[in-house]
Amino acid sequence: QQQVKQSPQSLIVQKGGISIINCAYENTAFDYFPWYQQFPGKGPALLIAIRPDVSEKKEGRFTISFNKSAKQFSLHIMDSQPGDSATYFCAARDYQLIWGAGTKLIIKP
Amino acid sequence: DSGVTQTPKHLITATGQRVTLRCSPRSGDLSVYWYQQSLDQGLQFLIQYYNGEERAKGNILERFSAQQFPDLHSELNLSSLELGDSALYFCASSPRTGGGEKLFFGSGTQLSVL
């Protein structure tokens, strides 16, 4: 019930392409859904976040799509760049954040 | 740079020992969170402090303890260390009261228990 399932585990995308990472949850009490980006040797950094009363949020090349009925949300990275190569984590909040397992994204030049 | 400082960056110790990890939050942030990151368990929330008081507890072992001092820095104490405690330990701070919003993470302390 408390899990957040993230897929895929790893992803390779060509430069300029669209990267899509998906997360699914069961707990309908979750009320905040952030995405974090982590580079090697660094801590995660907040990228973008959404609340369940909104279906989409866009910040630059990053978009969260949220499907409340399907209990799924996804991160889309448009015009993916080599600098976007990192590990991405989704999370969902009940009283604290429950984290997905992470997706290692590689953008090929 | 997130503004959160963690020391030391690396720590190598032996089983049965005790270590202390230190975290200085961003200026003005009253909330401090501790997380453990391992390959098989991912990011696990350990504990949160807000302005010196324990606010929320996660999957923190009884061998582990933490505190937040009046100057808002925090320490995570790990005792009777086991091989399985080897992991990356992150501290995060937030300007919010709780609930894991707007977390700013430090670069972590890599703990290796041999």
Image: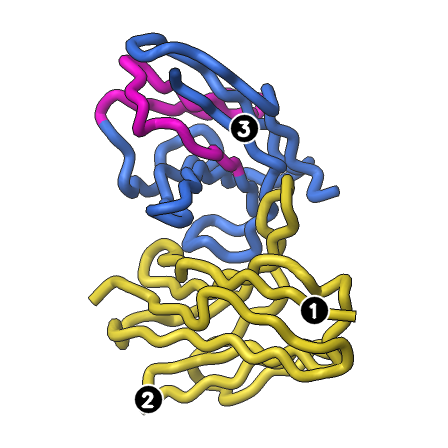
Chain colours: A yellow, B blue
Q: Residues within 10 Å of mark 2 (few under 14, many from 20)?
A: few
Q: Which residue is mark 2?
A: A70
Could you give the CA–CA distance between mark 3 and mark 1, rounded to whole angstroms? 28 Å
The residue nearer to you, when weighing A82 against A29, is A82
- Residue visible at 51% across and 37% down in the picture: B90
Question: In the rendered image, which quarter is residue A86 located in?
Answer: bottom right
Q: Name the residue type under label 3.
A: Thr
Question: Mark on residue B41?
Answer: none
Q: Which residue is mark 1?
A: A107
Q: Position of residue A46 (x, y in %)?
A: 60, 58
Q: How many marks?
A: 3
Chain identifier of the residue bearing label 1 in the image: A
Q: Position of residue B13 (x, y in %)?
A: 43, 12
- Residue visible at 64% across and 40% down in the picture: A41
Q: Name the residue type under label 2.
A: Ala
Q: Name the residue type under label 1.
A: Ile
Question: On the same chain: label 3 and label 2?
Answer: no
Q: Height in image: A90 above or below B76?
A: below
Could you give the CA–CA distance between mark 2 and mark 1, rounded to whole angstroms? 29 Å
Q: Position of residue A90 (x, y in %)?
A: 47, 65
| Quarter the N terminus of chain B occupies | top right
The residue nearer to you, when weighing B42 against A94, is B42
Q: Residues within 10 Å of mark 1 (few under 14, many from 20)?
A: many
Question: Mark on residue B109?
Answer: 3
Q: Height in image: B90 above or below B43?
A: above
* Viewer can see residue A60: no
Q: Position of residue A77 (x, y in %)?
A: 66, 78
Which region of the structure is painted magenta? B62-91
Q: On the rendered structure, is A89 left or right of A6?
A: right
Kindly state the secondary structure of the residue where label 1 is placed. Answer: strand
The residue nearer to you, when weighing A34 against B19, is B19
Please check the rendered image and state whether residue B71 is part of the magenta-colored stretch, yes or no.
yes
